[in-house]
Image (tube, helix red, strand yellow):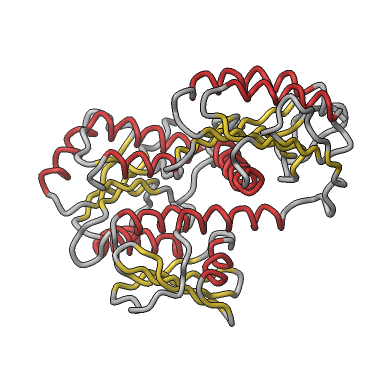
Amino acid sequence: MPARAQTVLLVDDEEFFLRSVVDGFAAHPSKVQVLTAPNGRVALQILERATVDLVVTDLKMPELDGFALVAELSRTRPALPILVMTAFGTPELEARLERNGISQCLDKPVDFPALAAKVFETLAASATGHLRGITLATLLQMIELDRKTCTVQVTAEGRRGTLAFRAGELLDAATGTLRGDAAALEILAWDQGAIDLAPGSAPRTRAVTGRLPELLLEAFRRRDERERTRAEAPPTVFTPLDEAAPDLTLTTITKEAAPMAVQDKLKELTSIEGFSGAAVFTPTGEALAMLHADAANVKDVGILTNAVLLNAQKASLEMGTGRGQQVHIEAEKAHLLARCLNEGTDPIRSQPGKAHFHLVVVLKNDASIGLAKLRINSLVEKLAEDFRG
């Protein structure tokens, strides 16, 4: 018996666009059936009576927009895959979307070949169980980029929190007795829960001082920290560099690696133009070694970058694309590169006799990004012999 055609619900208030997409998918009747809705309210009505495998929605629509639709689906159908079509307007914002891991977005105007390719790709990933609906973090970043004013209520495991946005800025957060940054970090660290989105005016005063991207990074780090299986970090041992390089300081924080061997190998990175610091971490986030140049906060930067790598690995595994090996974060004042080397099979825990660590490198500019990646790939292989327990 042939497999049934999968059903895609396309939500957009542009009638011509809806017709063109329906006509385009008419060439694939055995693969895709397309239902259409002019806004989120009609889309929810269709979902009540039809089995849908994928929702593709615009964000800006009358009556019930795409933000509210995504929020409602996160509560009622959290496993339903969603693709968002949006026109954020500038290459800078589009690049930031990609850097922040919002891969379930299509840039408008969307041509049919690009839309069809993304639809088939998403349906295939969903069929293997490697794709779910848009996460809270993704929705909040879209609210920020779209400069939307709204209140987001999140409910998870009996807890409830509120995040208030004005023109895309997170101004206030509250949960239980917590308020401001503390509340935001608590809510953002929750596992995916139900989301309710309400329009309206945000508070005039600011209770949250941190920016959303930084708050998300710190929340992810805290969530990962809670999941760690190691109760205690290895003891700290300080090993100074020789006098030939007085502007660098190396700290080795492990009993497993040979200090001088790690020291000599990390120093290979100092010849890269713009090198600012490097750090080696366990897969659960404990610092093993740090090499400082002019980045005094290399440990803090490294911990956050390491958390991004861990989340990228989890996402790549969930998508069925294999374990992620490297991430590149392009910030305003630095480039952050994180590379994983794992000789074992467990994505989190180290295994006896198998090297498993993360190398984070901080660069002041983009003059040597290509060279740095080549050096990093070579260096992790050399460091492996020092971290096989």
Which residue corresponds to the image point at 61% horizontal and 70% vertical from the top-left?
157
Residue 303, percent from left and from top:
64, 46
Which residue corresponds to the image point at 63% horizontal and 43% vertical from the top-left?
298
183 relative to 328, above or below:
below
Q: Residue furthest bottom?
A: 177
In the displayed structure image, the side of residue 47 where residue 245 appears, left or right: right
The N terminus appears in which quarter of the rendering? top left
* Residue nearest the observer in this picture, 250 or 314: 250
* Residue nearest the observer in this picture, 354 or 42: 354
Residue 358, percent from left and from top:
68, 34
Residue 58, percent from left and from top:
25, 51
Residue 345, percent from left and from top:
74, 31
Which residue corresponds to the image point at 81% horizontal and 41% vertical from the top-left?
253
In the displayed structure image, the side of residue 156 where residue 243 appears, left or right: right
Q: Residue furthest left?
A: 16
41 relative to 284, above or below:
below
* Residue nearest the observer in this picture, 127 or 109: 109
The C terminus appears in which quarter of the rendering? top right
Q: Quadrant of residue 69?
A: bottom left
**Number of marks in the rendered image:** 0
